[in-house]
Image: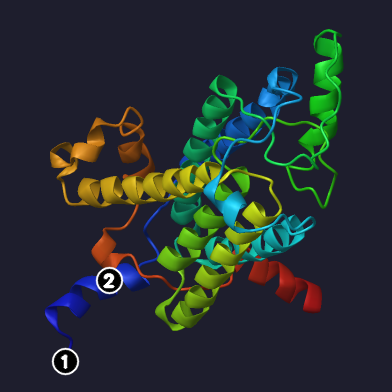
Amino acid sequence: MLGEKEKDILPYAISKEHIVRRAPTFVALGLVALGWFLNEVVWWIHERVPRNVDPLPDMWFSWFPEVRGAIRITEYIMLILVINAFIIVFCHQHRWIVARRVFFCAAVSYCFRAFCVTIFQVPVPSVNTYCAPKTAGGWEIVAGRVARMFWSAGIEQLRPRELCGDLIVSGHTLTIFTSLFTFKHYAPKKLKPVGYLFHVLAFCAIASILLARKHYMIDVVLGYTVSSRVFMEYHSLALSYHENQLERNLLSWSFWSPIVPYFEQDAPHPQHFLNRLEWPSSCAKRISKLIS
């Protein structure tokens, strides 16, 4: 005999008539593209970074020596977390809903980072960091430098760093913890041990950023704070929306909270939202055609 909870969940778990809108997911993806674009455009602050100035005092720097090349560890771990987060999103039974939530959280985090980088510049954290010379040229030269950096997405393994100044709020930290929270929140329970491993890897990656002197400690702390607060705030608002208590949640005072109903109106109630992984039917059909 099924209990009351199972009876409520079962129809939603097996229903094929529930239509999920795809437009909101593409809107969220567009916001991610906007955030990425803004983070590339703000490279113009390279011209404003203080030169011939010693790095600022930092508690981590006083405790640990610089380990040049440690950023490779960070970026390898970051790629592992990002790939696994994408697998969870792509294979989730509610993939269109999960994708829009994750994309929106990433977009808000990166737009906030672009704002912080624009308004505040500090000296580079290491005397060994190469910064391209300042130029007295116009926007053409600055735009050329930005274009060369755009495709690498800030990953130094793809292109060595030339421009400096994007320090406040670590972009690597934003990506690492947004990916980690995505895996933790949407992966099935049987993958929980993997989540513990990813927690360890995430903090190893953060330590490597600091050892490599790519960021000050405050940059990493802000990166974790922004990514965690945005992810938790959005999902708290989504829960309140489905409980018809959105206006009672003080987090709804956020300027971006009106977009929550647009993203969530076709999402299942949290009681019926099951974290199950399944291969997308369209891909399965294509693979079966290729095999046959």
Q: Disc 1 and disc 2: Cα gap in Å?
A: 15 Å
Residue 142, image x, y percentages: 81, 18
| Residue 31: x %, y % from top left | 54, 34
17 and 190: which one is in front? 190
Circle 2: residue type: Pro
In the image, residue 285 sits, relative to residue 225, either above or below, namely: below
Q: Tell which of 114 and 247 is nearer to you.
A: 114
Q: Mark 2 points at which residue?
A: 11
Residue 110 rendering spot, x and y as whole percentages = 55, 37
Q: Nearer the viewer, residue 280 or 150?
A: 150
Q: In which quarter of the image is residue 49?
A: top right
Circles 1 and 2, Cβ within 8 Å, touching? The answer is no
Amino acid type of the residue that numbered disc 1 sits on in the rendered structure: Met
Instruction: Please give left or right for residue 122 compared with residue 145 in the image.
Output: left
Q: Which mark is residue 1?
A: 1
Residue at x 44%, y 83% (from the top left corner): 190
**Residue at image point 41% right, 70% down:** 275
